[in-house]
Amino acid sequence: ALTVCARAMRDNGQFAGSVLAYSDVTEMVNALNAREDFVSSVSHELRTPLTSIIGYLDLVLDDEDTSDLPARLLNALQVAQRNAERLLLLVSDLLTTASGTMHLQRSETDVAELVRIALDSATPRATPIGVALGCDCEEDLHALVDPDRISQVLDNLLSNAIKYSPDGGKVTVRSRREGANLVLEVEDTGIGMSEADQQDVFTKFFRTGQVKKAAIPGVGLGLVITKSIVEAHGGRISFSSAIGVGSTFRVELPVSAP
Ligand code: ADP
């Protein structure tokens, strides 16, 4: 049950009476729990077969010599591998947003290490399209955060910076400590966003007309998730951007849990 109580006072400060509102929220709580159960079982049901498909494709394409495969078959398997990976990401994104809850598993983490790992794993995506990755990063950035979630934030911001720089350019990551916060910045010299579009980037499924026209793949959930992870940590996300100049996303995270 949810009970709300309001006291009414006269102008002279005397107590005039009170209003008590009582509401039974059992059904609402049950519905929310059912939604969480549903989301986590769908998540499991979708992920298990997909992970298995990806595992078999990886086995053929990554671990073995592929020179004995006919070119057409190799190409088809590579397309299937890429799309299965995209589907797995999409499933994770959809379920993270649908569940509406963000459970953090905080531990003492060296965020500088997470930045290095994120840069390493972004390199194979940046190099082929002529994007240079740079880092202006402090060492030893310890904070009480969920390392998987913060890696997800870094991956999302880096992969946007790269994919929205279709004509090449430079992506720079900056990380430093500022007082009680860690500051992470990802700057690109890519296509940027108009002022009107900037209002909506944290809205579910929003994508600018420009990226849809250029057929740059995406779903419009990455920044929604990124923002909810940052805010669950008690942090803030902001950005500045200009068409044809580029964008800079900035994340501030408290070093210790709020
Ligand atoms: P997605 O990249 O899957 O479309 P996001 O939620 O990450 O979804 O981003 C939403 C939209 O914001 C993108 O479709 C794009 O239009 C715009 N956007 C995000 N990051 C950048 C960036 N670094 N440069 C230009 N546009 C961006």
Image (tube, helix red, strand yellow):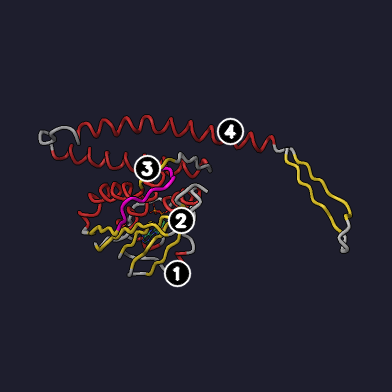
Judging depth in this view, the residue of 187 and 60 nearest the camera is: 187
Q: Which mark is residue 195?
A: 1
Q: In the image, what residue occupies the spot 30% across and 65% down?
A: 189
Q: Which mark is residue 180?
A: 2
Q: In the image, what residue occupies the spot 48% across and 60% down?
A: 200
Q: Please tell me which of labels 4 and 1 falls first in the chain.
A: 4
Q: Secondary structure at mark 2?
A: loop
Q: Nearer the viewer, mark 2 or mark 4?
A: 2
Q: Quadrant of residue 78?
A: top left
Cα distance, mark 4 to mark 1?
Answer: 40 Å
Instruction: Judge whether residue 57 is colored magenta.
Output: no
Crowd band around label 4 with a 10 angstrom C-alpha radius: few (<14), some (14–19), many (20+): few
Q: Residue furthest left?
A: 68
Cα distance, mark 1 to mark 2?
Answer: 31 Å
Q: Please tell me which of labels 1 and 2 falls first in the chain.
A: 2
Amino acid at dot 1: Glu
Above or below residue 233? Residue 183 is below
Crowd band around label 3 with a 10 angstrom C-alpha radius: few (<14), some (14–19), many (20+): some
Amino acid at dot 4: Ala
> Where residue 113 sits: x, y (%)?
31, 47
Magenta segment boundaries in residue numbering: 137-147
Q: Quadrant of residue 160?
A: bottom left
| Residue that label 3 marks | 89
Instruction: Give the quadrant of ligand 1.
Output: bottom left
Amino acid at dot 2: Ala
> Where residue 86 sits: x, y (%)?
34, 43
| Residue that label 4 marks | 34
